[in-house]
Amino acid sequence: MITKTMQDAINEQIKNEFYSAYLYLAMSAYFNASNLPGFAGWMRKQSQEEQGHALKLLDYLEDQQAQVVLKAIEPPPAEFKGPADVWQQTLEHEQKVTKMIHGLYELALKENDYATQTMLQWFITEQVEEEKTASLILEQVKRVGESGTALFFIDRHVGKMREE
């Protein structure tokens, strides 16, 4: 059985995952408005993936017969300085999420909650991939600049990455 402390922390992370989905949806809209459909598609799919993460946590609470409490989500930013700014914010956000997941794992250790530790292993592994991808795209955008043919090709490549 899950403790109330763990239940409350997971409910908070559900909110955080839904915020991530909102953030990436806002970034998708920005990229669409900037005529960067590959980046926009990547962010749209990332938004859907974050919703899936929230539901995975919600399902886990339900499996543990714990109470699910959905909390209000802050609105994400709607304006960005350019593609590099968006990818920088993406990387920083993923690093923040990694810290949140690690905090949940530390709490599960403290609570001797072995089931939650096991469930969180999936999220820990997922965060390694999330940070790696955001960092890679950011470095490529920084290298080629915020306009021109090279950015067009990176945009197309990133759009295809999510299709694979």
Image: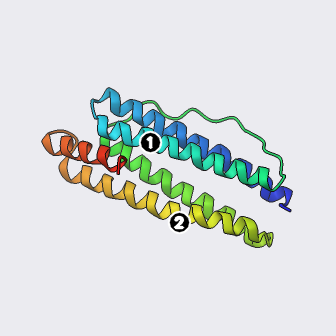
User: Compared to 109, does 46 lie above or below?
Assistant: above
Residue sitting at x 60%, y 41%: 18
Based on the displayed image, in which of its 4 quarters is residue 140 positioned? Answer: bottom left
The residue to which callout 2 is attached is 125
The outermost residue toward the top is 33
Residue sitting at x 80%, y 73%: 112
- Residue 164 rendering spot, x and y as whole percentages: 35, 51
- Residue 23 rendering spot, x and y as whole percentages: 50, 39
Q: Residues within 10 Å of mark 2 (few under 14, many from 20)?
A: few
Based on the displayed image, in which of its 4 quarters is residue 33 positioned? Answer: top left
Contact (Cβ within 8 Å) of mark 2 with mark 1: no
Q: Is residue 36 left or right of residue 43?
A: left
**Element at badge 1?**
helix
Based on the displayed image, in which of its 4 quarters is residue 27 positioned? Answer: top left
Q: Disc 1 marks which amino acid?
A: Lys
Q: Nearer the viewer, residue 14 or 57?
A: 57
Residue sitting at x 40%, y 30%: 29
Residue sitting at x 78%, y 69%: 113
Q: Residues within 10 Å of mark 1 (few under 14, many from 20)?
A: some
Q: Which is more N-terminal, label 1 or label 2?
A: 1
Count of marks placed on residues: 2
Coloring applied to the structure:
rainbow
Q: Disc 2 marks which amino acid?
A: Thr
Spatial separation of the CA atoms under disc 2 and disc 1: 19 Å
User: Compared to 13, does 113 lie above or below?
Assistant: below
- Residue 150 rendering spot, x and y as whole percentages: 16, 46
Q: Is residue 93 left or right of residue 103?
A: left
- Residue 50 rendering spot, x and y as whole percentages: 54, 46
**Element at badge 2?**
helix
The residue to which callout 1 is attached is 45
Q: Nearer the viewer, residue 75 or 118?
A: 118
